């Protein structure tokens, strides 16, 4: 099980617990503002863009090339950007903090 | 070749030069064929604009048949974002439960009826009515309006045989004028009324702006949805095991819909007008000429998609551009996705197999390329699970 914290654009902090599936799906199920997950998680919409807290970047690992290409052309992209549909929930993600990009 | 197959006519040109050439009413189009160039082109609105004279970014060009600007489609940032802000929340209603419930009823009724028939012509008697009835939910208009829209036939803008016949558009324009007047007099809960009361940059929208938004809602969501539904039926006719796969693993439905959109790419391309001399794939794009973003070619780019010519319903990484990319990405996508998700779910529940009886292909003539986008007609027999 992993506890994941989302910080939305209006500074609301939401901590959710998940055991499996993608971080995007967890956020969408719980109506986290700014994460829409339009494409259902196949990396084609970028409506699941988050900035991973600097200290958690090791836990989330690196984005694939396809994900990076997608992020490159999105707004507000920085070195901590990830598409959270590409983050699979495992114990390894426990405690991470994600700032919603939109 | 399988009947449901849509071949990729762009492969050689995409690999060799990356650019296709299409002459269109003496205003030629340089088609971007590679995934990377298509996405960059869509993103770079300063060099590749949408806000040219109305009709010019459409291929074939509609410059000679209309003056009305379609909104937000033919507007560039920053105004584009202001228009989208007005309508975006409305186009996200398909995520709400009452909306999906209505769509589900429409789709279930259509499939139940098809199952009772000896043969069904899918384009005109299944996909078109389905598309029109579903559109009443999007516009929040009375269900009975769909009868009028169905009577217009499959193309709102195009008469059979002549893609540039303006008369058909007149029917739609006259209809929209009436509806807008009605909404001004007696506001209801429909999209027209919503637009009548909306503010843009501190003022009300003009009637032409409202019409420009509504035209697009009718035109953009018609052939595209009809082809998607029809091609899906043809696909499942030849792949009954896929229906079984969806039945057993309903969690793949979202990726299945994205994959079908990638494979079908119901909108082949969309143009832009070049604002300053530039170069793409060694092609010199001069200011005031046209380029196009060829979504259909980008979606088969082997640099991005493994086995691009195969439909892999549970494809995990699928950065397709079937709904466009960047600012102008499809506003109707939420509606189209929900419709398709429910269609797949309901087909998998109720239909055991589909037999294709006969068909007539719909081939787009793109000058250098001929692309099959679907069917003009396809007769099938739906077989029920409960026989
Ligand atoms: C499977 C069905 C559909 C496909 C494949 C599709 C495809 C597309 C594509 C590729 C674009 C981008 C055009 C560009 O970049 O210039 C677009 C834009 C648009 N589509 Fe769709 N579309 C579909 C259904 C719909 C529906 C159902 C509606 C509404 C009823 C709709 C309304 C729009 C609008 C309003 C835009 C313009 C958005 C803007 O300029 O900001 N589409 N569509
Ligand atoms: S949900 Fe579409 S890219 Fe992540």
Image (tube, coloured by chain):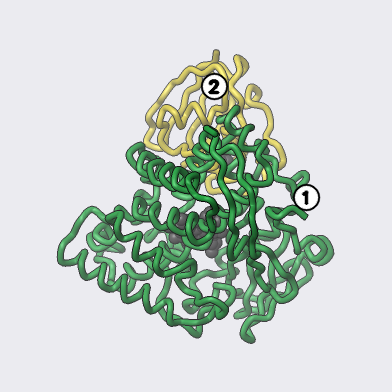
Q: Is ligand 2 closer than 8 angstroms to the Cβ of mark 2?
A: no
Which residue is label 1 attached to? B303
Chain appearing in green on the rendered image: B
Q: Residue at x 44, y 39 (%)?
A: A34
Give the SS element for disc 1: loop
Residue B290 at what x, y percent from top left?
Answer: 62, 76
Q: Alpha-carbon neighbours of circle 1 within 10 Å: few (<14), some, or many (≥20)?
A: few
Q: The C terminus of chain B lies in which quarter of the figure?
A: top right
User: Is residue B333 depicted above or below B243 in this figure?
Assistant: below
Residue at 46% of width from left, 39% of height from top? A36
Q: Crowding near pointer 2: few (<14 within 10 Å), some, many (20+)?
A: many
| Label 1 residue near ligand 2, CB within 8 Å | no
Residue A40 appears in the rendering: no
For the residue pair B126 and A9, the one nearer the viewer reads as B126
The subunit letter for the residue under badge 1 reads B
Chain coloured yellow in the rendered structure: A
In the rendered view, would you say B275 is above or below B314?
below
Q: Position of residue A37 (x, y in %)?
A: 51, 38
Residue B312's x, y, as percent? 70, 41
């Amino acid at each position: 099980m992993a506890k994941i914290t989302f910080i939305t654009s209006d500074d609301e902090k939401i901590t959710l617990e998940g055991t499996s599936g993608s971080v995007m799906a967890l956020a969408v199920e719980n109506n986290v503002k700014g994460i829409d997950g339009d494409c259902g998680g196949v990396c084609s919409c970028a409506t699941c863009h988050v900035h991973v807290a600097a200290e958690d970047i090791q836990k989330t690992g690196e984005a694939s090339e396809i994900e990076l290409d997608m992020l490159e052309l999105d707004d507000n992209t920085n070195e901590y950007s990830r598409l959270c549909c590409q983050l699979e929930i495992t114990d390894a993600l426990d405690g991470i903090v994600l700032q919603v990009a939109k | 070749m399988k009947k449901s197959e849509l071949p990729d006519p762009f492969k050689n040109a995409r690999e060799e030069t990356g650019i296709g050439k299409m002459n269109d009413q003496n205003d030629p189009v340089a088609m971007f064929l590679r995934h990377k160039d298509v996405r960059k082109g869509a993103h770079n609105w300063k060099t590749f604009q949408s806000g040219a004279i109305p009709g010019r970014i459409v291929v074939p060009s509609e410059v000679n048949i209309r003056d009305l600007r379609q909104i937000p489609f033919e507007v560039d940032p920053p105004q584009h974002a202001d228009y989208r802000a007005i309508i975006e929340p409305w186009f996200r209603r398909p995520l709400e439960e009452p909306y999906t419930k209505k769509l589900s009823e429409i789709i279930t009724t259509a499939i139940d009826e098809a199952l009772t028939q000896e043969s069904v012509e899918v384009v005109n008697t299944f996909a078109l009515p389905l598309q029109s009835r579903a559109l009443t939910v999007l516009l929040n208009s009375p269900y009975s309006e769909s009868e009028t829209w169905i009577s217009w036939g499959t193309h709102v803008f195009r008469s059979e045989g002549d893609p540039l016949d303006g008369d058909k558009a007149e029917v739609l324009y006259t209809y929209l004028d009436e509806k807008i007047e009605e909404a001004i007099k007696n506001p209801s809960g429909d999209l027209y009324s919503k637009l009548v009361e909306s503010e843009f940059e501190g003022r009300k929208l003009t009637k032409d702006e409202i019409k420009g938004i509504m035209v697009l809602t009718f035109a953009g969501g018609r052939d595209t949805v009809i082809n998607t539904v029809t091609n899906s039926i043809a696909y499942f006719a030849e792949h009954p095991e896929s229906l079984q796969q969806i039945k057993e693993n309903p969690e793949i439905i979202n990726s299945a819909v994205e994959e079908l959109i990638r494979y079908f790419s119901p909108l082949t391309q969309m143009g832009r007008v070049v604002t300053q001399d530039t170069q793409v794939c060694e092609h010199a794009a001069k200011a005031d000429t046209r380029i196009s973003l060829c979504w259909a070619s980008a979606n088969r780019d082997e640099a991005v998609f493994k086995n691009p010519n195969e439909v892999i319903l549970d494809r995990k990484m699928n950065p397709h551009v079937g709904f466009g990319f960047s600012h102008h990405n499809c506003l109707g996508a939420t509606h189209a996705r929900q419709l398709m998700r429910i269609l797949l779910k309901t087909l998998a529940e109720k239909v055991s197999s589909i037999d294709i009886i006969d068909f007539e292909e719909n081939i787009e003539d793109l000058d250098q390329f001929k692309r099959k986008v679907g069917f003009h007609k396809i007769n099938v027999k739906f077989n029920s699970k409960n026989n």
